[in-house]
Image (cartoon, grey):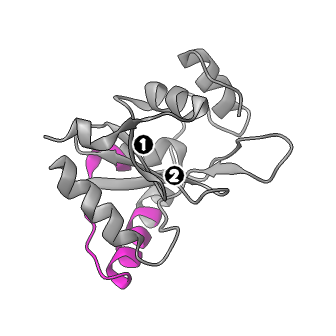
């Protein structure tokens, strides 16, 4: 994944893996979101589908984008739990923010999870902590592409 420095660069990165303006995968997004709700329940927590996450998934679900050309490290746009007990970590993030959150993507190298809150803001749950990525898709993916340091999610609580 190159360092993305503009909305156009984000669009180009996503376009290379099948995204295009107006892409709609409503049925797949709904099925994936429902599956995530079941997975969270099976992991001992509840999860509610929120409108900003479903809207994002409708446009991006199923995309798989490389993070580094020389490795199998990639970003997969699916709402997944990446490890047992992750539901509890997601609940703690939501409680800290004072807003519902929903997963929309993950990376395969670290198992970090990208989530959206009710306000449409993006966060990153990683084994090293909870981080704020941005106010919208473009800011979030530009921040994510730069890597660390990221801002602490706790600075964005209600």
**Residue found 67% across the figure and 56% down from its top:** 109
In the image, which disc is placed on residue 41?
none
Residue 103, percent across and down?
Answer: 41, 56
Dot 1 crowding, Cα within 10 Å, few <14, some 14–19, many 20+: some
SS label for mark 2: strand
- For the N terminus, give its image quadrant: top right
The residue tagged 2 is 105
- Residue 37 seen in render: yes
Residue 39, percent across and down?
Answer: 41, 77
Region rendered in magenta: 32-54
Q: Residue 79, relative to residue 157: is it above or below?
A: below
SS label for mark 1: helix
**Residue found 53% across the figure and 44% down from its top:** 60
In the image, which disc is placed on residue 56?
1
**Residue found 51% across the figure and 59% down from its top:** 28
Precedes in sequence: disc 2 or disc 1:
1
Residue 54, percent across and down?
Answer: 36, 50
**Residue found 65% across the figure and 24% down from its top:** 3
Residue 77, percent across and down?
Answer: 56, 51
- For the C terminus, give its image quadrant: top left
- Residue 22 seen in render: no
């Amino acid at each position: 994944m190159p360092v993305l420095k503009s909305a156009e660069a984000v669009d180009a990165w996503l376009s290379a893996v099948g995204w295009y303006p107006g892409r709609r995968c409503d049925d797949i997004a709904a099925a994936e979101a429902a599956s995530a709700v079941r997975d969270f329940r099976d992991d001992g927590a509840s999860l509610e589908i929120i409108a900003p996450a479903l809207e994002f998934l409708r446009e991006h679900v199923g995309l798989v984008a490389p993070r580094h050309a020389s490795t199998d490290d990639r970003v997969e746009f699916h709402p997944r739990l990446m490890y047992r007990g992750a539901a509890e970590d997601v609940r703690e993030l939501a409680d800290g923010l004072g807003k519902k959150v929903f997963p929309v993507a993950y990376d395969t190298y670290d198992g970090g999870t990208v989530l959206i809150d009710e306000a449409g803001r993006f966060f990153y749950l990683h084994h090293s902590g909870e981080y704020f990525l941005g106010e919208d898709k473009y800011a979030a993916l530009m921040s994510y592409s730069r890597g660390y340091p990221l801002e602490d999610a706790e600075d964005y609580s209600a």
